[in-house]
Amino acid sequence: MAQTSLPFKVGETIEVRSFEGGYRGAWFRCKILNIYTKEGKLFYSLKYIDYDEEEIHQTQVYQRFEDEEKEWLMVRPSYPPYYQEREVRKIEADQAPLVVVHGSWKVRDLVDWWKDDCFWCATVLAAKIKEPLQIELFPPPLGEGEIYSALRKDVRPTLDWSPEDGWTVPSTDGRKSQSVKLVKRVDHVPQDVCQTGKEQTEKIKKQKTERAKKQKTERDMPQKTERNMPQKTEEDMQQVKGNGEISLNIDESDSVEAAVYDLEELIVRIEWIKKMLSPDVGEGSTWKCQDYRPSSKGM
């Protein structure tokens, strides 16, 4: 793959892994001192940051492990900043984290373990409260495949990186880590996605403005008065909601006029009920609906 496909430059700090026995799959922090090609192969001259006595190392950027046909990319950017979920609320929007760890580690989560001044990729085998994690390193070529105890403070989420997709959360058997969320920074989002986000923001702002205007218009509208409040007829009184509820004017206005109209409508309803209780059987009818008057006895 051509160098133009990789974003790294001289002087930049990156991570590099090794296929050397005893350190297979471990990621080391290094600084690029030189970039060159040799026999059509891409090489980096690297200085190990955490090994002061280590000589400058010449690393072939793409390597095969033993007799494999696959070529592995041996370098990647410096690991992005990551935070516990409870810490994210304290961070401003323009400083949004890339990696968020929420909750506690769970069995089968993938972690990088800091040991011997490098990071080892591993799978969590046991995560008991108040006890170190039990982890198993990845099998060769991405690890040594052994089991260890690891303190929680010494682990971070395992991530994959590629020039095409950037940072991604890896999975085992199609299952991604339960304890990690990947939140990419705005400046890493493609231009077309940024444009879509901008359009969405403008749309939300427009909706808020229209809603505010509507609320203001409703506040400025004159309340119902005796002139503009429609007269309701006896027929209107029969149009009661199916659930038995009655619409009141005072639900829409706190004015005295609204209360008066509700009282008038109540009288109309009472007259209507009277007619229902008084069958039309002629002048000799013995049915009569009397107005209720409270007794004065005992008062």
Image (cartoon, rainbow, N blue to C red):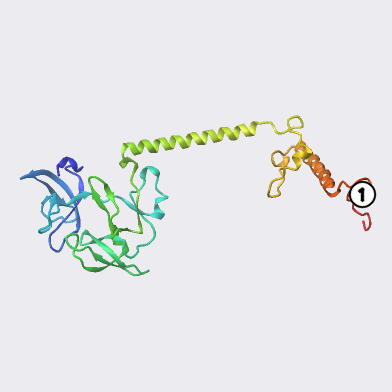
Task: Return the x and y of residue 144 as percentages of the image width and height.
Answer: 18, 64
Query: Who's the residue at 71% across and 38% down the image?
Result: 253
Q: Label 1's element?
A: loop
Q: Is residue 178 left or right of residue 48?
A: right
Query: Who's the residue at 76% across and 41% down the image?
Result: 237
The answer to which of 24 and 139 lies nearer the viewer is 139
Q: How many marks?
A: 1
Q: Is residue 267 left or right of residue 81?
A: right
Q: The N terminus appears in which quarter of the rendering? A: top left
Task: Return the x and y of residue 110 as percentages of the image width and height.
Answer: 29, 60
Task: Return the x and y of residue 57 as percentages of the image width and height.
Answer: 11, 52
Callout 1 crowding tier (Cα within 10 Å): few <14, some 14–19, many ≥20: few
* Up/down of 129 relative to 285, above or below: below
Give the residue furthest to the front: 281
The answer to which of 128 and 181 lies nearer the viewer is 181
Query: Who's the residue at 41% across and 49% down the image?
Result: 90
Q: Is residue 226 left or right of residue 42?
A: right
Query: Who's the residue at 92% across and 51% down the image?
Result: 286
**Dot 1 corresponds to which residue?**
285
Corner quadrant of residue 145:
bottom left
Corner quadrant of residue 148:
bottom left
Q: The C terminus appears in which quarter of the rendering? A: bottom right
Q: Amino acid at mark 1?
A: Ser
Give the residue furthest to the left: 39
Task: Return the x and y of residue 284 as percentages of the image width and height.
Answer: 94, 48
